Amino acid sequence: MKYLLAFIALAVLHAGCVWGQGQPTPQTGDEAAIRTIVNHWQQNWDRFDASVLQGDYADDADWLNAFGVRKKGGAEIVAYVAMVVKRPQNHERHTTWSEPRIRFVRPDVAIAYRDYQTGGNKAPDGRDLPDRRTHATWVLTKTGGKWLIVSHVISDENGR
């Protein structure tokens, strides 16, 4: 019985190694391409110009912000974000951005994470709002040699 269990363990290990050998690895430049896309989110807020996001989202991308707003598809997402960044109360804010962290789930699927803290937030009526500590997660896929966001979720820490 002891030898049978050892044989099964070795067979599973071997199968995992053989399967892994057949999987392509991310290509040179993939991480940089993903980092560029994630940095577009920062540029969008630093410049209050959502046009930099054009072409970053898949046609069927899902988007959810920290306030429960859901959008579907790149065009709808970019249009909504363009409206939000143009709001006058958002122009007094200042954000400190962490470096994006990127993890490849498969060579053609990656997850990117980024934290940021924003101060100077104003309500539509001009009231000061507390600083926000925000976490963003992007799921990206590579199709036809191009990385696109298929899901983007933005969340805030409790107690903000």
Image: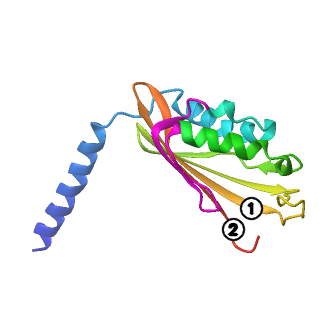
Q: Which residue is more in the foreground, 35 or 152?
A: 152
x then y, percent, for residue 144? 39, 25
Q: Nearer the viewer, residue 32 or 139?
A: 139
124 is within the stretch colored magenta: no
- Quarter of the rendering occupied by the C terminus: bottom right
Identity of the residue drawn at 67% across and 36% down: 40
> Between 25 and 153, which is closer to the camera in this rendering?
153
Q: Secondary structure at mark 2?
A: loop
- The residue labelled by disc 2 is 157
User: Image quadrant for the N terminus?
Assistant: bottom left
Which residue is found at the position 59% from the left and 62% from the top? 68
**Measured from the top left, where is residue 30 in percent x and y?**
51, 31
Residue that carries the numbered disc 1 in the rendered image: 133
- Residue type at mark 1: give it: Arg
Residue situated in front as seen by the camera: 106 or 117: 117
56 drawn magenta: yes
**Contact? badges 2 and 1 (CB < 8 Å):** yes
**Tag 1: Cα neighbours inside 10 Å, few (<14), some, or many (≥20)?**
some
Q: Amino acid at mark 2?
A: Glu
Colouring of the image: rainbow
Depicted 20 relative to depicted 159: above or below: above
Q: Which sits earlier in the primary sequence, circle 2 or circle 1?
A: 1
Q: Is residue 52 above or below residue 14?
A: above
- Bounds of the magenta span? 54-74
Which residue: 74% across, 74% down?
159
